[in-house]
Image (cartoon, rainbow, N blue to C red):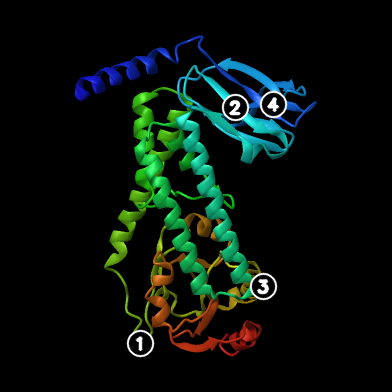
Amino acid sequence: MKIQGFIIFSLLLGVAMITGCSKGDRFTVEGTVTAADGDTLYLEHRALGGVVLLDSVVLSRKGTFRFRQPAAANPEFYQLRLGDRSAAFAVDSSETLRVTAEGPDLYRSFRVSESPSNDLLRQVDQLVGKTTATISQLEEEHKTGAIDDLTYINRLDTALLDYKGMISKVILGNPAGAAAYYALFQKINSFLIFDPYTRQDYPMFGAVATSWNRYYPDTERTRHLYEFTMNALKVRRQQEQQAELLENAIPETGTGLPDILLPSVNGEKVTLSSLKGKVVLLDFTVYGADFSPKHNMDLNRIYERYRESGFEIYQVSFDSDEHFWKTAASNLPWITLRDPQSVNSRLLPMYNVRELPTAFIVNREGDVVVRVEAFEQLESELKKLL
């Protein structure tokens, strides 16, 4: 009996998906926004190309409103806006959504009754907000010196992994749903939390892209997601193939100095020993730290002054977020690399790194000659070797 009931339900769901989005169908958003007498409530579409205004109404003292719009062939995203306050919601088909909210606190008070999809969207928003607050607190503790660099990176890693663990359940629970798509593209500090170019995060994009391509083929949002995901897979495979070719080609330094082989921003692996013949600043850092902008500006002044004399910077980042690192490092003129092991990197104990930034000067023969204790003395140390 249970199996038969499930089959009937599945058939009805399939019919609903086919007929619910047929040409001419419309969805309705209605409800009440209190404490907003005289304010204009806007209905806007969160389209791929940006936010598009669809309709508006001036609210009365009662705060009631009603909008009707054509339904899309796939789950689509909209928002209600009052001034600079907005609240997002999803529409699965031609349905009626009933909304309640308070004008002064639109985002936190926003509710869509009897809508499982929007309940999940709200759950995603809450988890993003919680993780953002955790990261902001870590940044503040790191800035004030309450925690050191490695503790900061370690806790940042933990916060992101905890978030991904919870959100993965939302995505894999129903990859064809609006919440799964919505969760993929959430950001913290303008950076995607899930990175499609990494092996760990790619399966989330693959699951949603495959499901949407199956249930909502030939729609703009599905095509965009599928092409975006397949391009990320292509780029990652090219990088992995290149890495495999270089994996067994790590040269020996011949000086007792532990060599380093890591991927640069463009995916190419560069060894420290390949810079023999130049005076090199081996700089261990993290771009997500508060010291990073000034640190790199100071290095840039020295680099521009001495690069023509055979000076090079080999900068190793321990940022846990690869996407953030790539964005921050893309405009730097020297060699920038990232250790994906972050705080678990073997390089930290190998070079006795206890705080970041830490740097060493390597002479033209490939020997470490100076551990930079104070960066204001860096230029004078370089002049002895250049």
- Secondary structure of the residue carrying tag 3 is helix
Q: Which mark is residue 99?
A: 2
- Secondary structure of the residue carrying tag 4 is strand
Please give left or right for residue 246 compared with residue 295 in the image.
left
The kind of residue tagged 3 is: Arg
Q: Quadrant of the C terminus?
A: bottom right
Mark 3–mark 1 Cα distance, whole angstroms, equals: 31 Å
To which quarter of the image does residue 270 belong? bottom left
- Please report the residue visible at 50 percent of the width from the left and 48 percent of the height from the top: 127
The kind of residue tagged 1 is: Gly
Label 3: how many residues lie within 10 Å, few (<14), some (14-19) or many (20+)? Answer: few
Q: Which mark is residue 256?
A: 1
The kind of residue tagged 4 is: Tyr
**Residue underneath mark 3:** 301
The answer to which of marks 3 and 2 sits earlier in the sequence is 2
Q: Quadrant of the N terminus?
A: top left
The answer to which of marks 3 and 1 sits earlier in the sequence is 1
Labels 1 & 2 near each other (Cβ < 8 A): no
Q: Which mark is residue 42?
A: 4
- Please report the residue visible at 55 percent of the width from the left and 74 percent of the height from the top: 147
Out of 59 and 43, give the one closest to the viewer.
59
Total residue callouts: 4
The answer to which of marks 2 and 4 sits earlier in the sequence is 4
- Secondary structure of the residue carrying tag 1 is loop
Label 2: how many residues lie within 10 Å, few (<14), some (14-19) or many (20+)? Answer: many
Percent position (x, y) of residue 234? Answer: 36, 44
Mark 2–mark 4 Cα distance, whole angstroms, equals: 14 Å
